[in-house]
Structures are given as C-alpha cells and as structure tokens.
Amino acid sequence: MDQPRLGGKVNRRRFLKTAAGTTAGAALTAWSLKRPAPARAAVRSDRARAAEPNPKRGGVLKWAGPAEVAHFDVHQGAFRFVLGQMHNNLVRFNPADGLKTIIPDLAESWKVSSDGNTYTFKLRDGVKFHDGTPFSSADVVATFSRIIFPPAGMASIYKDQFAAVDKVEAIDRLHVRFVLKEPRPYFLELFTPSSMIIYSKKALDENNQDLRKVIAPGTGAFMFKERKVAEKWVMVRNPNYWDPEIPYLDGIELLHIPAWTDRGTAVLTGQADYSPNVSLETHQEGLKRKDIVGTVRYPGEFNSYQVHINNERKPFNDPRVRRAINLAVSRQNLIKAFGTQEPIMLTRWMTHASEFATPMKELEGLPGYRADKTADIAEAKKLMAAAGVADGIKNVDFVSASVAPHAEILAPAFQEELRRTLGIETKIRVMERALLIEELKKGTFDLMVQTEYRSPILDPGPGWEMCLKTGGSLNFSRYSNPEFDRLLKQINSETNKGKRKQLFAQGMALLDQTAPLYLIGFTDHLPMWRNIVKGHNSEARVFSELGRVDTVWLDR
Amino acid sequence: MRKYLAQRLLIAIPTILGVTLLIFIAMRVLPGDPLSAISGEGGGTYVLSQEQLRAARASLGLDRPYVVQYLDWVRDVLRGDLGKSFWRGEPIRELILRRAPITGQIALMAVILSWVIGLPVGVIGALWRNSWTDYVFRLVVTLFMAIPSFWVALMIVLSLVLTLTWRPPLTIAYLWDDPLRNLQITAGPALALGVALAAMMARITRSSVLEVLGEDYVRTARAKGLRERIVVWRHALVNAMLPILTVTGTALGALLGGSVAVERAFGVPGLGLALVFAVAERDWMLIQNLVLLYGVVFVLINLVVDVSYGWVDPRIRYQ
C-alpha cells in the first residue's frame, strides 16, 4: 500500500487550508476538553463505576438522611456517612456488583503473606488531598496508627476491631504494611466501611491528632463547600479526582432529615432524590408509586434489636433460665408487634446477610426460632424448674429507652411474652436513651431492650469479639464463657472458609444453649429514590451499606 | 408609666436570675451527662476509659467547680456570648438567630389566625347564645380544643402527600429571602396551631362578651340608641378584651417556646425541636441558654400584656 506523501511544497492555498484545519481542530479539542466527556460505557471491575451503561454527567443529588454530626472526627465517632463522601478508603465494596467483591480504592493492589499475618498495600500514585497535599504511605500509617494505638485523650472507637494488629509501617512512599499478631480472615473487609477513611498526616499533625473541630480535607470524589448546621451539607465535584471517570454528579446536597417519615415524604414529593432509609409506611406508599420512585429492602443491616440479660445477676446467671427465655418468647410475635416501625428479620446471632448465617428455611424449624412454640415452652418450663424457678420470677427490673418504639412496643410485648409463657413478672423502667450507657456500664439492670448487639462489618467475627467475648467492649450482657472464647479465637484465626463456616455453626449452637442475651433480630433498611437516580444499584445489594454516592448519576 | 416600666424591669432581674439558677442546678442534679452522647453517635454506647472521659470532660470545661461554671456562664451571657452547643459545637447565638425567626413567625401567624377566627366566632356565639348557630359553633370549638394540634398537623401533611404528592419544604427559607417558600413552610404549622388556639380564643371571647353584655354601660349605650354593631364592637368587645389579651400573651409565649409536636410533624427546624434534642443529648449549655431565652421572652410578653391593659381599658392606670 502506498504511503501518504509527507512534506511537499507549501503554497498559499495549502497554507490557508492547513491553518483553517488546525484552528478548527484546536477549537474542537479545546471545546471537548472544556466540556466533560461522556462517561464510558465499559464497567471496570477494579474501579467503582455505575452498573448501567452510558451514565450521564451533571446534576446535583439531594440525599435525605441523618446528616448532622457532633464533630468532624470520624475515627472518634462522628457520623461517617456524611463525612465519608469527601474521603477514600484503602479498599471498598464494589457498587456495580451489589457489594459482593472488594475492589481497590486508594490501595491499587494488595498482597497477603502465606501465613495471613502480613498485608502489604500498594498505594495509588498521584493522588492529592483537596488542599493539594500529595497522598502517600505516611498518611495511611498516621491514620491507622491513631486508630489502633490512639494518643492520650483520643476516643478511638474502632480500636477494638484492629486488636490483632501488631504494627503499621511504611515500606516506601507507596507501600504500607500491616503486621498482625495472628491472622484475621476478615482483615481486608475491616477497611471497607465508610468509617475507614484516610486522613492526611498533615491535617492530623496540624491539629494535634484531634480532628473533632476541623473538616479535614479528603482525597474523595466530592469536596466540602458549605454546611448549614442541622440543615444540610453541600459538596461539589472534585475536579482533580484521581479517578477521572467519577463522580458523574456535579455535586451533592445532604439534607439533614432525622425522621424516617419525613425522608420518605421528601422523596415521594421530589424534595429529595434519594434516601437510604425511610419509614415503613412511606416505603409501602413508594411501592404503589413505581412511576415516580423506586424502593427495595436492603437485606441485612449490621444493627439488631435485642434484650440484654444481665448474666451476673441471679437467677439470670444460670444459663438454663436464659435458655428458657430464648425458647419461650416468640420472636415472630415481637417482629410482628414491631412491624409498623422497622423491618426486623428472624436471625440467629448474626446478620442474615452473612454467608455464615443459618438459612431461613432451616432457622424456621429450630427450637426457639420456630413459630410453633408448644414444644419450646414445654422445654423452657422444664429448664426453669431445673434452675429452681418453676413458679416464675418476680420483680425483674426491665429497662427501656424512653423512645416510643422501645418503651411502647418492644418492652411491653416482651414483658407480656415473659409473663404469659414463664410467669416472669417484670417492671419496666423507662429512661432517656442518653442515660442508658451508665446503666449498661454499671450493669444495674436485669433486662434491657437495646440496639447495641451489632457488627462493624458483614463478617460476624469482629462483632462477636465486641459483643460476646469475655470483657468485649459491647458485651453489655456480661456473658463470659471460656468455651465460647476458645471457639471464637479459633473462628477468628481460621482462614479456610469451609472450616470457618463449621466453626460458626458450632458457635451458634453453643450460643443457643448458653443464651447470652435474647436476640430479637437484625434489621433491614428501606431505601427510596426518584426514578431518575441511577448508579446506586440498590436492587442488587447483598447487604445494607449507607456509603458513598460517587457512582450515582441522574437520568435527566 | 416610665417609673412603672422601670420597676417591672427591675423586678424582672431577680426573676431571670432565678431562672438561670434553677436551670443550672436542674441540669447538674438530674441524671445524665453530655459526654455519653458526645463520645459516640451510635446511641452513645461506646465505652470510654476513665482517662478518656476525664479528658473529654475537661475539653468541655465540665471539670471546673459548679460555682465557677455558673458564674462564667452568667458573665458570658451578660457579654452577649451564649457559648457553644456541646453536641454540635455550633455557637448558640447563631442557632437561635437561625431558628427563632421561623418559630416566631409561626407563633405570630397562629395568634393572628386565632384572633381572625376566634373573635368573630366568640362574639357571634355570645350575641346569638343558645341558638342553632351557637350550638354548632360550640360543638366545633369543643372539637378543635379536644383534637391535639400535632394530629391536625399530621393530617395536613398526610393529605398533602397522598392527594397532591406535595409536602411543605423541609429546609429553612426566611420571609425576607423567599416569601413564597417561607409561607409554604410556615402556613401549615400556623394553621395547625392556630385552629386550636382559635377554639380557645372563641370560648373565652364568648364568655367575656356575655359577661360584658349585661353591664350597665352596654345598657346605657343601647338606651342612647346606638346601633347594635357599635354597641358590640366598640363597647362590649373592647371591655371584654382583658382576658383575651392575657390568654394571647400566654399562648404567644408558649408558642415562641415552640410547639414541638407540630414542628416535628411538619419537619420544621424550630426552637422547640432544638430544645427537645438538647434535652435528649444532655446538651447542658444549649438547654441553659434556651430556657433563659424563654424566661426572658415570657417576662417581656407579660410586661407588654400588662401595659396593654391600660391601653384597652382606660380605668386602668399605672403609677
């Protein structure tokens, strides 16, 4: 094939043609650079992307939810869903596949040593914080050192999750190593929640390791623009975001709407585009109005409703009494009674979204979980008799928060179940929610309705460490069982998934028998969105994550 | 009059000081601690070590003796510094400036509405007493006095959402910034509060006017041949205004404190809701300052009501 001829004599006509072409080309290039390129259709499995092809760019998403924060330090307990929008993690769950796999975020890749004790992360190069500070391994080390080995005066609320970490060290500018005392099969997952954001070392140093009063710059897809206290946060697209493909939105407005019903009506009436959790009645209304809104149930939140049983007080220090309560009280009745408030699912010691959870069909046939209580109540009465309380128990102190769903629904329903089935007479003591912490810490209660049996991640391992292990930070029932502690140590260091599943099954059987507390069930979230909101992939989610919205786009 | 006003204002000082002392002591005596709420937002149930608690307490100035805390607070208030919310870190002055206009506007609109509806209904009921009109009015008045305002509020919101797929805006818009949006926010709560207050106002107006209609000066006015309209509106109603003014003052004070249930039903970010959250979060500084504000408002409204008696009733003179 003939090669095109290059060079040649330049005459006036040819010069003008070339100049005009070049000018037009330059103008076109400038125009196309100024104008955001249409989003690519292809979905990269290693980057966060919208699941739909050809996402549109532009627009501002109005998000309705709890957007108020007490302070700005996420690692000291500030509300992460708002602040997390401005930051990145090391890794995250993939929104495009319904949060099934872990994909890179600020860590480009990672390696796990053969003994499972060392995690080495290779970090992305060229990333900058919103104030222009370059991101490096020093930021990761500073962030996690502060969480795991907090300085004096810092309330590191995620410290317990990383108890297995021996040290965090920078290998070079772009490599970080976490060395564990013993392997943790869920270790990588610990970095996925929106609380595990990376702060800059510079911001931490400048503020004496305390970010409660500072909105620290992140590396995230959105940058802080404005905050109207108790009203809304306004964030704008980060034009220098390290991933040029996202975010698709120009900005987000996070509206502080604390009441579930208000969030639902806000979406239904178009005042908000998306809410991660609305009330049951507005969710039901949304199901009737599919022409304007979409709504599903996010299966498996990480929080639950439970009744703490004080394991140190008589006669509840006898596992037979606790087991009797677990057998006799109908979970189905409690869930039904609470049905107007929030969807609680029948669950056994872990969120139903976990791969280690007992399948629903099997669970519905198990003693204590089945709907037909005849045999369970008979067995419970035998256990009560064996424990020397065949005639029931009088004057049981039953504490409940003063909020209506607890004090007016769950506590009275549980009280009636106890009285009817086992002759346990309780006196409900209602108190404000802020005061419950003191009761929990002092252990000055027999029973208490609460929502603190939970897990930080989908894997139940760290949740069990905090809520059920002897001395665990959230072990408010004061359960102490050396056999369980040994089994938990095995569960949390076993890296083989099949073996782990067996161990979890053993653990649940042991918990059924020794009944540290009465778990009513884990909850579902009820998101709702206007039909124009795409890219959140809510229908495909395998668990509930109120995380970032950087893959959301508006089909306007 | 000036002397009277000065006396009343002087008397108000110990009253307000009493309010500050009472609320300060109440907050320290009642169980609960702002730290439990501040240290973790997950229901406040992250267990902190004693050392962490000490540090957090010191950072909020709660480790100082109570006397020092009280005197510092009073000194700051006198200088116009209301401090910061323990929970949100927001200057309380800004919070009040942001929320008070909406709450104040709703309260004023509710009071105006209650007069517009309540006064004519009360007067008509008194003039045509024991007629069918009076029976119907009394029935409606009793009904609206019995129905809680928050229920009316919920019904308004629900019917708007279900029939028109519309609800009042959930974010603040001030009258001077965006009048239309502002009215969309305030009209509903004002209506819900106003109809209940109108019922009360109608009842009081009816009984007051009835009482006045039997007075000698009304008989004299009629004997002079004055038209009934002038007798009623100029002679009877004006003299029946004292109890109406008293109720109006009290109601206005209460509404400025915020009608929490109605604010919650409409999602209006007013002062009442702020106080409720502050109590739940044990935000002592915010509670102290809001209660102090309500104290001052009540004292001033009472003063205005007392002064207005002299304006309405020439027999009353202040010396």
Image: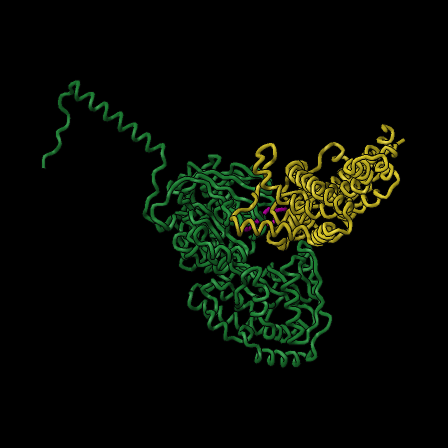
Chain colours: A green, B yellow
Q: Position of residue A268 (x, y in %)?
A: 50, 50
Give whichever of A379, A534 is nearer the camera. A534
Q: Is residue B219 above or below residue A101?
A: above
Do we see residue B107 in this rendering?
Answer: no
Q: Quadrant of residue A477?
A: bottom right
The image position of residue A387, as x and y in percent, is 66, 78
The answer to whether residue B253 is above or below residue A15 is below
What residue range appears in magenta?
A147-156
Question: With A87 as the anchor, is B97 left or right in this view?
Answer: right
Dominant secondary-structure state across the stretch colored magenta: loop
- On whether residue A35 falls in the magenta region, the answer is no
Is B187 on the left-hand or right-hand side of B32? left
Residue B237, how many percent across, how many down? 79, 39
Q: Which residue is drawn at the image coordinates 57% and 77% (left, top)?
A: A373
In front: B161, or A195? B161
Measured as percent of width and height from the top left, residue A396 is found at: 71, 69
Left/right placement of residue B301 relative to residue A17 reads: right
